Image (spheres, coloured by chain):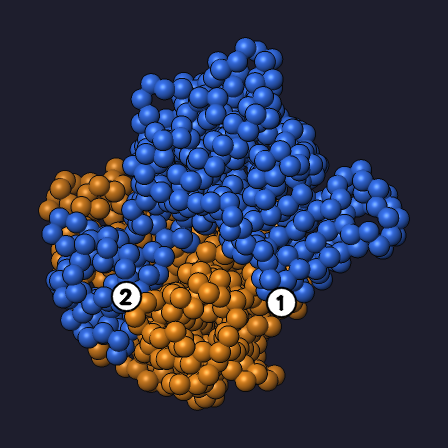
Chain colours: A blue, B orange
Amino acid sequence: MELKIKFMKWSAGRPVAILHKKIAERAGIHVDDRIIIRRNSHSIISVVDTAVGMISESEIGVSTEISSGLGLKEGDIVHVDLSLRPESVSLIAKKMECKRLSEKEVREIISDIVKNALTETEIAYFVSAVNLCGMTTNEIKSMIKSIVETGKTLNLGKRIVVDKHSIGGIPGRTTPIVVAICAAAGLIMPKTSSRAITSPSGTADALEVICRVDFTISEIKKIIKKTGACMVWGGSLGLAPADDKIIQVERLLNLDPESQLLASILAKKIAMGSKYILIEIPFGKNAKVNRKEALHLRGKFELLGKSFNLKLKCLMVETDEPAGNGIGPALEIRDVISVLKRESSCYNIESRSLSLAAEILELAGKSKKNQGMKLATSILNSGKAFDKFLEIINAQDGDINHIPVAKFSHDIFADKNSKIKEIDIKKINQLARVLGCPANKAAGIYLWKHKRDKIHQKEKILTLYSDSEIELREAIKFYKKSKPFILK
Amino acid sequence: MELKIKFMKWSAGRPVAILHKKIAERAGIHVDDRIIIRRNSHSIISVVDTAVGMISESEIGVSTEISSGLGLKEGDIVHVDLSLRPESVSLIAKKMECKRLSEKEVREIISDIVKNALTETEIAYFVSAVNLCGMTTNEIKSMIKSIVETGKTLNLGKRIVVDKHSIGGIPGRTTPIVVAICAAAGLIMPKTSSRAITSPSGTADALEVICRVDFTISEIKKIIKKTGACMVWGGSLGLAPADDKIIQVERLLNLDPESQLLASILAKKIAMGSKYILIEIPFGKNAKVNRKEALHLRGKFELLGKSFNLKLKCLMVETDEPAGNGIGPALEIRDVISVLKRESSCYNIESRSLSLAAEILELAGKSKKNQGMKLATSILNSGKAFDKFLEIINAQDGDINHIPVAKFSHDIFADKNSKIKEIDIKKINQLARVLGCPANKAAGIYLWKHKRDKIHQKEKILTLYSDSEIELREAIKFYKKSKPFILK
């Protein structure tokens, strides 16, 4: 049917169209059905809501996602049809039976995710099937290819492009320090990061405290040309739009299935044109994975890396405590700056960053074997890394002088003399989330004490920060209930 | 924060609220977040969209689900807060790891589904976890209890209340005939049916062609008082609102996990106060389940029936072809009326209906063992069943004289002399869905030939019906591609 466009001045996060209830009923279209809206040779798939009174029977109300997606003007005539359930829904059903998908089938699902042809609920079914049934190496390869094909890519020519990725789960930011050292050494490092999935703050969340992290591909090219590196959010780049949507759905349940994690990381590295890649896999009792899972993951990464012709190395790091003192976007970026300024080693942030930078320098041939640490340390100590960091932050329209401080804070003191046997990272992460991380940049936790530290009665052990009094109160309750510090 | 209600005159199928973009940003609320809207002592949980221009910064736009749910007037002041992610999300995550849920945990999930505290995407995660991990008998019992607790119930006192349920998958309607016979025999039969999940037409979809099927509990009581029975849609009754939402999410992927099927059926029977229950389990090569699965299901039904103190019997029926000639709501109800009028046996509809009625008459003590068939047949032949059927349809504000006929039809003829070896029910179901079933009541298939029939070249074998020329063309294409008739 033909309908007249009415702007709703409404951003719904996805294409949403509103039809008059009568018209929808007459056309057999129900709330939450998908329709296809056509204008000339362009089309967009949208979810439907119905209304009475808001729009007339000859109109279709559209969210800004539709009007900008199709370049529409108010009053334009569009052609509207019920969109049939896409073929990929039956492929998701197939995966729900734990059957293998061919490359063509994976590509169909991924391309429908990008085209908005699949709803979030259908994507959730796909994620949970992958989570419970797993994927073969061939399926993961197909995922990587499809994700790269349906996204944008960065071509930096024949220069030595390196990258680093940590599979996360442990708070504390080493990435900005590693990027600063490597770029200062003359390597090209187009670093994209994700926002938090299961942790209180992703690298992108932390960097956003001091600079922009959302750029277009051509803006990034300029930043890299100027500074040799960038530190941006991968999500706004359109590098892997399918993966971005999948992550959005995974977040609802804090899911992060292994095969999706592998595909997500490698697709983004390939799209950015990186050839030399270091993958950090923190493991340990409280990390995302244990030693066995970490070894398994390393095997998978190496196998996939080879098949995509990458120089890929995995660095396994046993960690059973947060890196650094701060947890939460603002508090973590403060730690980073302290290390770069040589004011503090911020517990273990300095040593972890140096190890990672050393590995990359060796992997990319900037130093001989076993000489990477020496080079990395001299770059950090000389202030060159800090200069490079400021140069990059500046190129990304930022500065380090406006880091927010939370409105409310609460100190927690030891109630007896004791020693910290362990810190439960999962509980610490949950605590930071209760405080408002990662949406609230200033929220988080400052650790005054670490593993193996002795603590005296009435000594301050941590400070909680939040911009909401309610969340702070909730967090104090949660702290008392969950006891993240295990004392001996 | 306090905001002023603005009606959007908008029914979105679930509570949806619209905040001004600035206000949402200031409060840290994102698109698709959940908020809690409070007015006096009442509250409702809603999903958020943001808008610019549509509403002012002091207003909140609400869908009709919110305005009617809270009894709001335009301009009312409400209190709006970000709703924390409910505890049940972590319980769904637990089930995703295939861990067992306690009765308390199941109750929490079910009650949050009813309260709209869980989004469809989160429910999809729950459904897929149940689909892939299964549920223990104790978990299913907890599901049944929780579904019944969170819904309405019908109390019909000490009369003999019977019910019948077919686990479906095979087109063809026997239920209205069985209800008519049993009610004519003096039994109380408060039959609730679902709409189609995987088939082209549920019993409720077919009955809706000739009468209302959406009633309140008190209306149903009146219908039963008048006629001894009813044939209504379970979904509008609020008997099992949790189950209704779960089914809505299952439909997206044509899922129907065993444990959910058991819980769904038994919860509704218990809520309706039925004590004598016959479960029909069609099995066979093309049915929903095979013999082994049918036996397994029977065991589960009997175990659960015992634990809820029901007189429950399972009737296993080997079926490998559709019952009756018509497939689709209007065509199926025509078959039912033909049998009741004694005009035709409609292939095997008559014999299947009589077997089911006979079992119920025996189960509830209306006839001696092995005498049920004799009684059922005499009630059908005497015209008492048809009279009772008309009485019920009349009490449900309907009549049988206005059955719609599809606008477009297409006959399919045999292209050679042959014999029908088999009819692929899944493909026939898909074909009917392509034609527009169940939303389009008149759409469907009429089978002129059945299994084991000889067919001659140029003889008519089936007719396709649809109200849409496009869907009819799609269906012809699908028929040619899928070949649902297997000839020998």
Tag 2 residue: A9
In 3D space, how far apart are the residues under numbered discs 2 and 1 (Cα atoms)?
Answer: 33 Å
The quadrant of the picture occupied by the N terminus of chain A is bottom left
Q: Mark 2 lies on which chain?
A: A
Residue located at (46% from left, 56% from top): B121
Amino acid type shown at disc 1: Ile
On the question of residue A374 being in view, the answer is yes
User: In this view of the protein, which residue sits in the foreground, A197 or A361?
Assistant: A361
Is A229 positioned to the left or the right of B126 in the image?
Answer: left
Q: Is mark 2 on a helix, strand or loop?
A: loop
On the question of residue A172 being in view, the answer is no
Query: Which circle marks residue B479 in the picture?
Result: none
Task: Name the quadrant containing residue A345.
Answer: top right
Q: What element carries label 1?
A: helix
Task: Name the quadrant containing residue B440.
Answer: bottom left
Tag 1 residue: A470
Is A435 positioned to the left or the right of B355 in the image?
Answer: right
Residue located at (67% from left, 49% from top): A446
